[in-house]
Image (tube, rainbow, N blue to C red):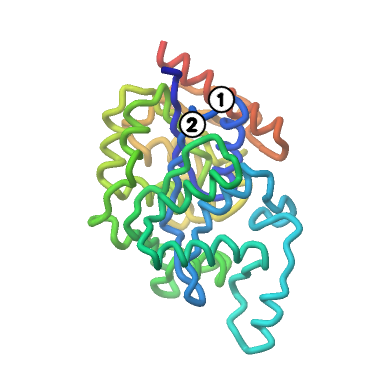
Amino acid sequence: MSARYAVLTGGVGGAKLVDGLYRQLPENSLTAIVNTGDDFRHFGLPISPDIDTLLYTLSGKSNSELGWGREGETWNFMAALKSLGGEDWFNLGDGDLALHVLRAAAFAAGEPLSVIIARFASAWNLQLSILPMSDNPVATWVDTDGGLLPFQSYFVEHQCSPKVKAVHFEGAAEAVPASGVVEAIMESEAVFIAPSNPWLSVDPLLSIDEIRTALQETPAPVVAVSPLIQGKAVKGPTAKLMGELGLETSNQSIASHYGTWLDAMVVHGKDTAPANLPVSRTDTLMTSSKDRERVAEAALQLAKEIAA
């Protein structure tokens, strides 16, 4: 049986690493386990932002200018919505609506999210497994100086401006991993943690006990790609949030946050490495497909060295 690999991911940066791994590895050897703590309902439609970002990225349909949504998107629905006085803080593109409408219909028919995603991936001929972290609802809530906010309200409506005091994951205690998630972690040659926000995009996965336990017990090396470049995040509030939580904005803080199950880290250029952790150094800024492949190759090679 050919070697298999798993990656835990969320957000745009995570999708870029998954794309690099997908380009580097044989077909059907990669499993992407995706954050669903961002999922919510908007105008009655079930939205799965991180899953949809990954689907668009891997299929070549992502909007490179915006960093989210579909390339060549039109906004007639939003214009009509605004004309009727509808809330417009979260944009839904005309093409993007297809995923949400089909997901709503499938949910109404009793299908779990994992089955729905597999069908979307198959329709776009994606040769990998894309799994939600759970088929049970887990919702990220952000405790801020402006009160307790659901994730999308904090991230999109308020543009991450409130000061964060803590992050909570409603439903995590009851949630179980989606079918195949634990097996992917336990049976892979290597497990990767994408350069996603550790507190907002990776912690939702870790909030499910069986996923955290699998990371602790897997015989595979677990390699993280740092989301920091020269002490800053390329996109999103990682550095801002770390400061608000009283943490140094460093690779050491991220490694300490993940804990003893982390075996190695890919860091940017000459950035300071975590103490007592093997590292690989490369330019981790991923603006092109070649960049994505370079970072993926660095992670794969580091995992191979750790395994040896």
When the figure is inspected, residue 216 is found, relative to residue 287, above or below; the finding is: above
Q: Observer-nearest residue: 247 or 228?
A: 228
| Three-letter amino acid code of the residue under disc 1 | Leu
Q: Judging from the image, what secondary structure is the residue with disc 1 in? A: loop
Q: Position of residue 23 (x, y in %)?
A: 62, 29
Contact flag, marks 2 and 1 (Cβ < 8 Å): yes
Q: How many marks?
A: 2
Q: Amino acid at mark 2?
A: Leu
According to the picture, the residue beneath numbered tag 1 turns out to be: 25
Single out the residue that lies furthest toward the front: 109
Q: Is residue 61 left or right of residue 114?
A: right
Asked if residue 265 lies left or right of residue 217, the reply is: right
Q: Earlier in the sequence, mark 2 or mark 1?
A: 1
Within the image, what quadrant is residue 65 found in?
bottom right
In the image, taking residue 285 as reference, residue 205 lies left or right, namely left
**Rendering coords of residue 85 (x, y %):** 62, 89
For residue 258, say whether it is visible.
Answer: yes
What's the mark number on residue 30?
Answer: 2
